[in-house]
Image (tube, rainbow, N blue to C red):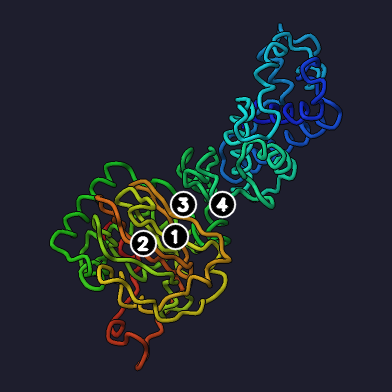
Amino acid sequence: MLSPGAKVNPILFLEALKHSDSRKERNIYELGDENEEILHSLENEVNAVAREISSKTGIKLDDIPTLKDWFIGCYPDLIKDKSTTRNCLTSHSVYSALQEDFLKGLNNEPEQPKSRYLTEQIPYGLVSLKGLAELVGLNTPTIDAVIEKCQQYLGSKFIENGHLVQNSLQYTSAPQRFGINILSKLSRIYVPHTKDKKLETTEFKSEGITFFGKLLSDDSFNEIDQKITEKLKNCPETDVDKGLLNLHWKDPWFADLVSRPEFVNAACDLLEDDNVKVFSSLIVVKPPLGKSMVPWHQDAAYQWPIDPIDCASLWFALDDVSVENGAMEVALGGHRCGALPMRPTPALSDSQYFFSSQLQNSIAEENIQNFSLIHCTMARGECSFHHSMLPHSSPPNLTNRRRCAFVVRYCKSNTKLMIHPGMPREEFFRDYKLFDPKENREVIQ
């Protein structure tokens, strides 16, 4: 966001286009009134994005200098007129020597060599800033317009109708290219979570998912990883409804794990409750080159017998999670639409099977298309929480490495079990109980 080149060079390119007949004779760093105003507007939009990121995440971005101050600070002896940004550019004693390189590719023939000031500062400059703006939900009409005018000379479409073009992200440094497609993913790189968890709570409400990064120390993580790996030994990949479910009722160690204050406190913040209970817990694992897949579904839509239905489901990654090894894909905001229609899941190939028998019914993909979809890529040791009604799916693990996570569904403290004769899965839920982490901690103490 500091980079002056990302803001200035595309505007200088547009100025050069206006003087096609005289561009070799004139100072290319001399902006006209119109492009000076565009540069000023673009700088204001970038600063607005910086302020919004700072406000929501706590990342310190309030010390970005103005373009004028940056030029004066870097070149105090090379600039004759320091009164405005435009004059700093025009009166710089060295910039005029760069004209020949800057003038490359001022037409849009694909084979024409392009100026590095264009090939660098659009995909790796302005498009990156546009990606940050999308993370915080800010409209950037000036940035959009500049990208749209310049991209035609690069033979690529980076933006269309005010939004990034997904297929072009691989040629940019936009955060979305690296799986940073929701603001909490950006925040976790710099701070584990916002100080008061306002960002995470807001995202959980609006998007149905939020990312906390690493909540536990490396020592704690290594202990958990070792314990769960031991538990997985000799456990078939298909044994998810028995051996890997609700271990917190069967093993005191897992009871302590779901009661960890780092997890419980985060769930309390997201559900806005002073205490929470555990509806269920589960080890989910996709072995290397595994066969199980998860069609589109909403967890609680499978007639969970609880009221209220709101749960914050911890997804604690024991391994790195990538698209290739079966990362969840979620439909942002889908939890606010109620139960989406389900139908029998299309038949699988002989080499695949459902992660759970309940998934014989699932949401048709055409009912997901209107949502914004993201892949929940994570590093080992990181945590996310998603709402119990958030639509999600995941493909088989096509890699040679395991994808394992520990899932805990935390519900509100006033949640009641709604168990009655003739209910779905009556036998399974007949003696079911909710687990209270607070009571468990009191016993431990």
Residue under pointer 2: 395
Q: Of the two numbered discs 4 and 2 on the same chain, state the one appearing first in sequence.
A: 4
- For the question of whether residue 85 can be seen, the reply is yes
Q: Are marks 1 and 2 in contact (CB under 8 Å)?
A: no
Q: Position of residue 387 (x, y in %)?
A: 47, 65
- Circle 4: residue type: Lys
Asked where in the image residue 256 lies, by quadrant, the reply is bottom left
Q: Of the two numbered discs 1 and 4 on the same chain, state the one appearing first in sequence.
A: 4
Q: CA distance from mark 3 to mark 2?
A: 21 Å
Q: Of the two numbered discs 4 and 3 on the same chain, state the one appearing first in sequence.
A: 4
Residue under pointer 1: 329
- Circle 2: residue type: Pro
Q: Position of residue 60 (x, y in %)?
A: 58, 34
Q: Of the two numbered discs 1 and 2 on the same chain, state the one appearing first in sequence.
A: 1
Residue under pointer 3: 211
- Please state which of the two labelled residues, at mark 4 or mark 3, is closer to the viewer: 3
Q: Of the two numbered discs 3 and 2 on the same chain, state the one appearing first in sequence.
A: 3
Circle 4 residues within 10 Å: few <14, some 14–19, many ≥20: some
Circle 2 residues within 10 Å: few <14, some 14–19, many ≥20: some
- Circle 1: residue type: Glu
Residue 74 sits above or below residue 131 on the image? above
- Please state which of the two labelled residues, at mark 1 or mark 4, is closer to the viewer: 1
Q: CA distance from mark 4 to mark 2?
A: 32 Å
Q: CA distance from mark 1 to mark 2?
A: 9 Å
- For the question of whether residue 246 can be seen, the reply is no
- Circle 3: residue type: Phe
The answer to which of 233 and 119 lies nearer the viewer is 119
Asked where in the image residue 360 lies, by quadrant, the reply is bottom left
